[in-house]
Image (spheres, helix red, strand yellow):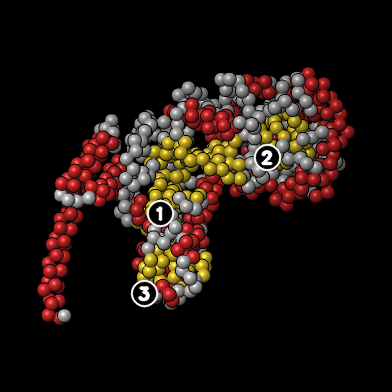
Amino acid sequence: MKRNSKPKDEGLQQGRKAIDQLDKELVRLLAERMKAVQGIADVKRENPDAPLRDDTRERELFEVWSREAVDRDLSGYFAGRVLREILNWSRREQERRLRPKGEESTTGAVRVGYQGVPACYSDMAITKLFSTRDNKGLARQGFRSFAAAVDALEAGEIDYALLPIENTIAGSINDVYDLLARRNVTIVGEEIIDVEHCLVALPGTKLEDIRVVRSHPVALQQCGEFLDNLVGTVAESYHDTAGAARSIAVEKAVDVAAIASQESAEHYGLQVLARKVHDQRENMTRFLLIAREPEVFDQRMPSKSSLVISVNHRQGALLSCLQAFATQGVNLTKLESRPLAETPWEYMFYMDIEGRLDDPAVATALEELRVHTNRLKVLGSYPRCMLEGATVQVSVPQAPTKKKGEVKNGNSMPRIPASPKKSSALRLAGSREDASRTRVRIGGVEIGGPEFVLISGPCAIESREQVLEAAAMVKACGARIMRGGAFKPRSSPYSFQGLGFEGLDMLREAGRAYEMPVVTEVLRIEDAGRIAEKADMLQVGARNMQNFALLRELGRLDRPILLKRGMSATIDEVLMAAEYIMDAGNNQVVLCERGIRTFETATRATLDVSAVPVLKSRTHLPVIVDPSHAAGVRDLVLPLALAATAAGADGLIVEAHPHPDEALCDKDQALTRADLEELVHALRPIVAAQGRTL
Ligand code: PEP
Ligand code: MN
C-alpha cells in the first residue's frame, strides 16, 4: 500500500499544479475581457444613441462559443453556461459605468439596511447588488423588522434599505408592499437571487443525531418533502434563516439543524449536511432597493416602474385603468391586490409596468389612470434586473433626456411628467377635455353626483353627550355627513382648543351610531395619519389652505379631503392647493367656498357666490359651500345657503348645535334644530330645480 501511494500522489500533485496554472490564466483572461468591456461601456457613455444591448451580437457569441467548445470535445451546453455568467457580469459592469458620476462621489461608506442578521439572504442580495455599484465601501446594518429599516432610512441613518418583495414559491411579501404604500420612500433598484436552502449544523453533527430543524416558517414550508423524509425530527420556526443558523452556533446545540444558506453556515462556523433541500427546483427571491430620493439612470437601461392605486368604487374602474396601459402599449408585468385596512372590502392594487415615468406613453397612460383612481402613488422608476442569462428582446422606451440642472421638487415621490397633450399649470385639478366631473365618495356618500349633499354638525366636539345629541338632530334633518372639530384653530390661545383625539373618538362613535360618515379638521402634519384612521374625510381649514407641507402629507393618504378656501386666497390659489394634494397622489378632493375677507364688516366674511360657477368651469372637482363661517350669525346662514345652492354648489356644510347658547365655539352662527329644518325645507325646490335630489 505505502509503496504505491507515492507515485500516485505525485501524479495528483502535478495534475493540480497544471490546473492551478490554468485557473490563474482563466482569471487573468476574465480580467482582461472585463477591461475590454469597460472600454466599450465608455464608448457607449459618450454616445447616447448606441444601444446598450445587442442581441444579435450576443446570439453570435453563443454560437461561436458552442462551436469552439464542440471542436475541442467540450460540451456546448457547459460553454454556454459559462458565457452566460460572463455576459451577465459584463452587462452589470456596463450599467455601473453608465451610472451618473455624481452618484459615485459619496463620501464614506454607503450605509445599507436590511432585515435580519449577517449572512442572511438579504445580506447576500446586498453583496450581489452593490458589487456592480461604484461604492468605496459598504456599511451594512441589520434590523429586526422591515419597518425598522424604513424608519432608519427616513431618518437619514442609512442611505438605502434592501427589502425582499416576492419569492417564486412563497409569493409576495405584503408587509413590504404596505410600507412602500405608506412611507415617504422610493424604489431605485431591484435584485434577484437564487435561494439555495441547505441543512446546516455544528461540525461533526450526523444526520441521524438531529432532532430539531429550525428555520423561518416559509423556508420550512419550502423544504416540506425533505423534512418529511427526515424521520424523528420536528420543525421549529424561527424569525429568520440565518438567525436560526446563528442560534445553533451560539447554543452549541448538537441535535439541532437549521435550514439556511451555505453562506450563513460559513459565517457562523457550521457545516453543510445537505444542499438544495427545497422542494421546487427554482427558488428565487426578488429584492427592492429603497431610497429617500429617486435616482437618475441611463435611459437605455431596460426599466420598470411600480405604482399603487386604489380605484373609484364604480363598475369597470379597474378595467379602465388596465385599458389605459393597453391603449398606450405599456406592458403590465405585475398586478397584485391588497385589502384596504381602513375600508373593508375595498382594495388597492400594486402594479409593475415596463418603462420609465418620463416615457411619453407611460406618462399619458398614468394621466388617464388618474381619472379612474382615488389614489395613485408612484413607488419608483428603476433599472430592471435582468434574469440571469435571459436573452429575450427587451423594448427600451425612448425617454427624453433629463436636462442638466433640473431641480428636484422637494418631494421625494417620483413625479409623473406632464403628458405632451396637457401643458396647463393645473395638470391634475384643471377641467378635462371631455368635461367629465369627479365624484368623491365619503363612506357611502358621494359628492359631485346627482345627490346634493348636506354636511352638518357642531363647530367643535365638546362632550360625548353633545356630539350624540347633535348627530341625532342633524340626521333627523337630512344631513348625510356629520361634521365636528376635534382640533380647533382658534384666534386666541385662551379659547377652547378642542378635545383632540378623545373628541375624534366621540365623533366617530356618533357617526357610527347614526350611520353618517364624519369629517374633521387636521391642523398638524404629524396627526394626519392617525386622524385618517378614525375620520372618513379630512378637512383643511381656511387658515391652512397654503400649508403646503400639510397638503402634501394629505396627498399621501387614501382619504377624501375637504379643502376650504383661505380667507384671502384667490380662486387660482385654491386650485393650486388642490393640485398639491393631487400631485402627491390623492385625487379625492372636494373644494369649499367659505367666505373671504373684504372691506365689508357687516358679515364675518363675504361669501363669494361667484366662486361656485367659476370653480366649476375651471376644475372637475366637486364644489361645496360653507355659509356658516361666511355669515357669522345664524340669521344670515339660510339666505346665503340658498344663494350658494342656486349658484350650483354640489352641497353645503353648515354648523348646527343642539344648544347653541352653550356652544364653546362659534355659538352665534350655530343653527338650532328648527333652523336646520327650515333650511332643508327651503332648499328642496332649489335642489329639485337643478335636477338633483336632497
Ligand atoms: C371650521 O369649519 O370649523 C372652520 C374652522 O372653518 P374655516 O377653516 O373655514 O374657518
Ligand atoms: Mn366654526
User: Which residue position holds label 3?
Assistant: 203
In the rendered image, residue 506, in percent from the top left (x then y), is placed at 76, 49
Q: Horizontally, is 633 left or right of 257 in the view? A: right
User: Which residue position holds label 1?
Assistant: 281
Residue in the foreground of this view, choosing between 673 and 382: 382
Number of residues whose C-alpha sits closer than 10 Å to that of mark 1, classed few (under 14), some (14–19) or many (20 or more)? few
Q: Nearest to the eye among marks 2 and 3: give it.
A: 3
Tell me the kind of residue under disc 2: Met
Element type where label 2 sits in the image:
strand
In the rendered image, residue 328, in percent from the top left (x then y), is placed at 46, 27
First in residue order: circle 1 vs circle 2: 1
The picture quadrant where one finds residue 562 is top right
Element type where label 3 sits in the image:
loop
First in residue order: circle 3 vs circle 1: 3
Q: Are marks 1 and 2 in contact (CB under 8 Å)?
A: no
Quadrant (top left, top right, bottom left, bottom right) of the C terminus: top right
User: Which residue position holds label 2?
Assistant: 537
In the rendered image, residue 351, in percent from the top left (x then y), is placed at 50, 39
Residue at image point 79% right, 35% down: 479
Q: Residue extending furthest top?
A: 689
Residue at image point 39% right, 75% down: 205
Q: Is residue 240 visible?
A: no
Residue at image point 44% right, 57% down: 279
Q: Residue extending furthest right?
A: 674
Q: Is residue 114 visible?
A: yes
Tell me the kind of residue under disc 3: Pro
Give the vertical position of 251 relative to 179 (above or below).
below
Q: Horizontally, is 675 left or right of 524 in the view? A: right
Q: Horizontally, is 456 left or right of 374 in the view? A: right
